[in-house]
Image (tube, helix red, strand yellow):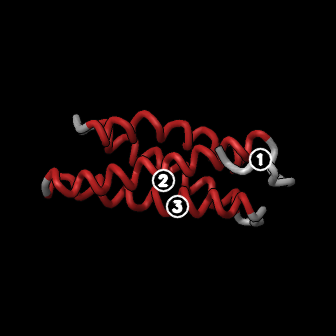
Amino acid sequence: MAVEQIEHADDHMQECIDNCLEAAQVCEWCADACVDEGEEMARCIRLCRDVADIASLHARFMARNSSYHAELGELCADLCEECAEECEGHDHDHCQACAEILPNCVESCREMASS
Protein backbone atom coordinates (compact mmCIF):
# COMPACT_ATOMS: atom_id res chain seq x y z
CA MET A 1 0.00 0.00 0.00
CA ALA A 2 1.28 3.44 -0.90
CA VAL A 3 2.05 6.01 1.73
CA GLU A 4 -1.33 7.28 2.84
CA GLN A 5 -0.02 10.59 4.14
CA ILE A 6 0.47 12.09 0.67
CA GLU A 7 -1.71 15.16 1.10
CA HIS A 8 -2.72 15.66 -2.53
CA ALA A 9 -3.55 12.00 -3.17
CA ASP A 10 -7.21 11.06 -2.86
CA ASP A 11 -8.36 7.43 -2.62
CA HIS A 12 -8.33 7.00 -6.41
CA MET A 13 -4.77 8.23 -6.72
CA GLN A 14 -3.64 6.06 -3.81
CA GLU A 15 -5.22 3.04 -5.48
CA CYS A 16 -3.55 3.89 -8.78
CA ILE A 17 -0.15 4.26 -7.11
CA ASP A 18 -0.62 0.85 -5.48
CA ASN A 19 -1.76 -0.74 -8.75
CA CYS A 20 1.18 0.73 -10.65
CA LEU A 21 3.69 -0.53 -8.11
CA GLU A 22 2.10 -3.99 -8.16
CA ALA A 23 2.18 -4.00 -11.97
CA ALA A 24 5.86 -3.05 -11.94
CA GLN A 25 6.66 -5.86 -9.52
CA VAL A 26 4.79 -8.59 -11.39
CA CYS A 27 6.22 -7.47 -14.73
CA GLU A 28 9.79 -7.50 -13.40
CA TRP A 29 9.20 -11.06 -12.17
CA CYS A 30 7.60 -12.11 -15.45
CA ALA A 31 10.33 -10.60 -17.63
CA ASP A 32 13.03 -12.28 -15.59
CA ALA A 33 11.26 -15.65 -15.66
CA CYS A 34 10.59 -15.39 -19.41
CA VAL A 35 14.31 -15.19 -20.11
CA ASP A 36 14.51 -18.91 -19.29
CA GLU A 37 11.52 -19.77 -21.51
CA GLY A 38 13.24 -19.23 -24.87
CA GLU A 39 13.38 -16.81 -27.77
CA GLU A 40 9.64 -16.98 -28.44
CA MET A 41 9.15 -14.92 -25.26
CA ALA A 42 11.07 -11.86 -26.53
CA ARG A 43 7.94 -9.72 -27.06
CA CYS A 44 6.62 -10.62 -23.61
CA ILE A 45 9.94 -9.70 -22.02
CA ARG A 46 10.08 -6.36 -23.81
CA LEU A 47 6.50 -5.43 -22.92
CA CYS A 48 6.94 -6.46 -19.28
CA ARG A 49 10.12 -4.41 -18.99
CA ASP A 50 8.35 -1.41 -20.53
CA VAL A 51 5.41 -1.77 -18.13
CA ALA A 52 7.73 -2.07 -15.13
CA ASP A 53 9.47 1.16 -16.09
CA ILE A 54 6.38 3.18 -17.05
CA ALA A 55 4.24 1.97 -14.14
CA SER A 56 6.89 2.79 -11.55
CA LEU A 57 7.48 6.18 -13.21
CA HIS A 58 3.74 6.89 -13.21
CA ALA A 59 3.55 6.06 -9.49
CA ARG A 60 6.42 8.49 -8.83
CA PHE A 61 4.77 11.22 -10.94
CA MET A 62 1.56 10.86 -8.95
CA ALA A 63 3.41 10.88 -5.62
CA ARG A 64 5.06 14.19 -6.48
CA ASN A 65 1.86 15.58 -8.02
CA SER A 66 3.46 16.14 -11.42
CA SER A 67 1.31 18.05 -13.86
CA TYR A 68 2.20 15.35 -16.42
CA HIS A 69 0.86 12.35 -14.53
CA ALA A 70 -2.39 12.24 -16.52
CA GLU A 71 -0.59 11.94 -19.85
CA LEU A 72 1.72 9.30 -18.43
CA GLY A 73 -1.31 7.49 -16.98
CA GLU A 74 -2.82 7.08 -20.44
CA LEU A 75 0.44 5.66 -21.79
CA CYS A 76 0.73 3.34 -18.80
CA ALA A 77 -2.83 2.07 -19.32
CA ASP A 78 -2.24 1.41 -23.02
CA LEU A 79 1.00 -0.41 -22.36
CA CYS A 80 -0.47 -2.50 -19.52
CA GLU A 81 -3.36 -3.47 -21.76
CA GLU A 82 -1.04 -4.62 -24.54
CA CYS A 83 1.17 -6.51 -22.11
CA ALA A 84 -1.80 -8.24 -20.48
CA GLU A 85 -3.01 -9.41 -23.89
CA GLU A 86 0.45 -10.77 -24.69
CA CYS A 87 0.75 -12.53 -21.35
CA GLU A 88 -2.71 -14.11 -21.68
CA GLY A 89 -1.36 -16.08 -24.63
CA HIS A 90 1.27 -17.88 -22.55
CA ASP A 91 0.65 -20.71 -20.09
CA HIS A 92 3.46 -19.83 -17.70
CA ASP A 93 2.43 -18.92 -14.15
CA HIS A 94 4.32 -15.65 -14.28
CA CYS A 95 2.55 -14.63 -17.50
CA GLN A 96 -0.84 -15.57 -16.11
CA ALA A 97 -0.10 -13.49 -13.00
CA CYS A 98 0.58 -10.48 -15.25
CA ALA A 99 -2.59 -11.09 -17.23
CA GLU A 100 -4.54 -11.14 -13.97
CA ILE A 101 -2.96 -8.11 -12.27
CA LEU A 102 -2.45 -5.67 -15.14
CA PRO A 103 -6.16 -4.94 -15.83
CA ASN A 104 -6.38 -3.31 -12.37
CA CYS A 105 -3.59 -0.95 -13.39
CA VAL A 106 -5.28 -0.26 -16.73
CA GLU A 107 -8.53 0.71 -15.03
CA SER A 108 -7.02 2.96 -12.36
CA CYS A 109 -4.60 4.64 -14.79
CA ARG A 110 -7.43 5.41 -17.22
CA GLU A 111 -9.40 6.90 -14.34
CA MET A 112 -6.42 9.05 -13.32
CA ALA A 113 -5.84 10.12 -16.92
CA SER A 114 -9.42 11.29 -17.28
CA SER A 115 -9.61 13.16 -13.98
Q: Circle 1 is placed at which residue position?
A: 4
Q: Which residue is mark 2?
A: 24
- Residue 23 image point, x, y percent: 49, 47
- Asked whether, in this view, residue 62 is left or right of residue 106, the answer is right
Say which element carries label 3. Answer: helix
Circles 3 and 1: CB atoms closer than 8 Å? no
Q: CA distance from mark 2 to mark 3?
A: 8 Å
Compare residues 58 and 74 and report the one nearer the observer.
Answer: 58
Residue bearing the label numbered 3:
54
Q: Residue at x 23, y 38 (%)?
A: 92
Q: Nearer the viewer, residue 18 or 43?
A: 18
Residue 47: where, in percent of width, then height?
Answer: 37, 56
* Identity, as a three-letter code, of the amino acid under mark 2: Ala
Neighbor class of circle 1 (other Cα within 10 Å; few <14, some 14-19, many 20+) is few
Give the residue type at disc 3: Ile
Badge 3 or badge 1: first in the primary sequence: 1
Residue positioned 54% across, 56% down in the render: 55
Image position of 71 with respect to 22: above or below: below
Residue at the location (46% across, 58% down)? 52
Question: Which label's residue is closer to the chain start, 2 or 3?
Answer: 2
Disc sitting over residue 79 in the figure: none
Q: CA distance from mark 1 to mark 2?
A: 19 Å
Find numbered disc 1 in the image and state the secondary structure of the residue it sits on: loop
Q: Earlier in the sequence, mark 1 or mark 2?
A: 1
Camera-near label (2 vs 3) is 2
The nearer-to-camera label among 3 and 1 is 1
